[in-house]
DNA sequence: ACTAGGTTTCCTGATT
DNA sequence: CAATCAGGAAACCTAG
């Protein structure tokens, strides 16, 4: 309890949700329900695989890549453009066909999730998940999302609160195995929004799909989302864009001159191409 | 305890 | 004028 209060200086749960509330523009014209429940809120590890959306299936795949230190092309995401129900019906053989050697890993991990769940008793706690208003999900998802990572090495992360920054010191190291979960890198976060149009309520748009050129339509909303993912309610496009500019040097992004809010994936960015392997 | 990578924060100045 | 873009500098955070 102390930890929650301590962290309030840097990021306030309330301010986070309020900010998003004050800026409903990016949900205009879209189903608020869909958006909040499948993209911003409920994440793959919060619900049974059977009910995953395509997006959540991808989140799971991304997580496996990260926790197993695999290269992005170890798993052909395009082979998994399916929802959880379909995923759960796949046999080991089908997994192997779809993902080669990684198929075994995917299959066994999924079996584990199917039968054991990953969130233990917290998984269906009402205050965390089930019925979410747009507001509640905004805070609850963050309390939740970092808690159960890395089930390839079944462990027991404590459900870190959203305000972990300062309080973390007193959380036993052995319990904070992987705080930087799947796809937490900014460019991957951006990429994933682009790759999931049905979950992208007009936030970012491809300008040239084959060239990897894209444009921010709602820069501040994206920044808010990014901030939410990082438990930082004070994220702004100004700051997010600074991080984006650092990618130029690493060639994860290429500069696009003269066009505001436009970026282009560079040669070190993986996983954004339509037929990438 | 220390380090490196990846931001985050802040800032000054230029550009659109 | 406000919003962006450009980078430098330094602080921060987390995994290792």
Image (spheres, coloured by chain):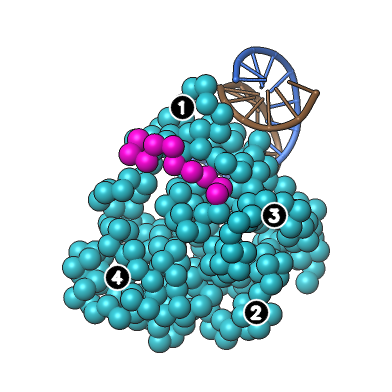
Chain colours: A cyan, B blue, C brown
Chain of the residue on which disc 1 is drawn: A
Instruction: Choose the circle earlier in sequence order: 2 or 1.
Output: 2
Instruction: Choose the circle earlier in sequence order: 1 or 3.
Output: 3
Specify whether disc 2 shares its chain with disc 1: yes
Front position among marks 1 and 3: 3
Magenta highlight range: A202-211
Instruction: Choose the circle earlier in sequence order: 3 or 4.
Output: 3
Front position among marks 4 and 1: 1
Q: Is the C-beta separation of discs 4 and 1 under 8 Å?
A: no
Chain of the residue on which disc 2 is drawn: A
Question: Is residue A204 found inside the magenta-colored segment of the image?
Answer: yes
Instruction: Choose the circle earlier in sequence order: 2 or 4.
Output: 4
For the point 33% across and 76% down, the residue is: A86
Give the Cα separation between the discs numbered 2 and 3. Answer: 20 Å
Give the Cα separation between the discs numbered 2 and 4. Answer: 32 Å
For the point 42% across and 80% down, the residue is: A50
Which residue position holds label 4? A105
Pinpoint residue A126: horizontal percent, then vertical percent.
66, 83
Front position among marks 3 and 4: 3
**Label at residue A131:** 2
Residue A173 at least partly seen: no
Category of crowding for the residue at label 3, using alpha-carbon neighbours closer than 10 angstroms: few (below 14), some (14–19), many (at least 20): few
- SS of the residue at dot 3? helix
Chain of the residue on which disc 3 is drawn: A
Pinpoint residue B15: horizontal percent, then vertical percent.
60, 15
Q: Answer with left or right where residue A213 lies relative to residue A221.
A: left
**Label at residue A255:** 1
């Amino acid at each position: 309890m102390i930890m929650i209060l301590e962290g309030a200086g840097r990021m306030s749960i309330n301010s986070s949700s309020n900010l998003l509330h004050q800026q409903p523009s990016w949900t205009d014209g879209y189903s608020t329900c869909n958006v909040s429940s499948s993209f911003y809120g409920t994440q793959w590890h919060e619900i049974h695989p059977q009910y995953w959306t395509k997006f959540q299936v991808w989140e799971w795949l991304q997580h496996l890549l990260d926790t197993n230190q695999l290269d992005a092309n170890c798993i052909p995401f395009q082979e998994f453009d399916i929802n959880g129900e379909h995923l759960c019906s796949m046999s080991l053989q089908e997994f192997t066909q779809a993902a080669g050697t990684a198929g075994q890993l995917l299959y066994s991990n999924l079996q584990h999730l199917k039968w054991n769940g990953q969130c233990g008793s917290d998984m269906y706690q009402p205050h965390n998940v089930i019925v979410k208003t747009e507001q509640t999900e905004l805070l609850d998802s963050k309390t939740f999302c970092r808690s159960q990572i890395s089930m390839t090495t079944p462990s027991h992360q404590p459900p870190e609160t959203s305000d972990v920054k300062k309080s973390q010191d007193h959380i036993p190291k052995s319990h904070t195995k992987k705080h930087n979960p799947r796809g937490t890198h900014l460019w991957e976060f951006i990429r994933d929004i682009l790759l999931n149009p049905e979950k992208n309520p007009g936030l970012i748009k491809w300008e040239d799909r084959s060239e990897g050129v894209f444009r921010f339509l709602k820069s501040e909303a994206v920044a808010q989302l990014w901030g939410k993912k990082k438990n930082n309610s004070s994220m702004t496009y100004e700051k997010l864009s600074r991080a984006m500019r650092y990618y130029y040097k690493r060639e994860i992004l290429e500069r696009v001159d003269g066009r505001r809010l436009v970026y282009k994936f560079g040669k070190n960015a993986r996983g954004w191409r339509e037929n990438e392997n």
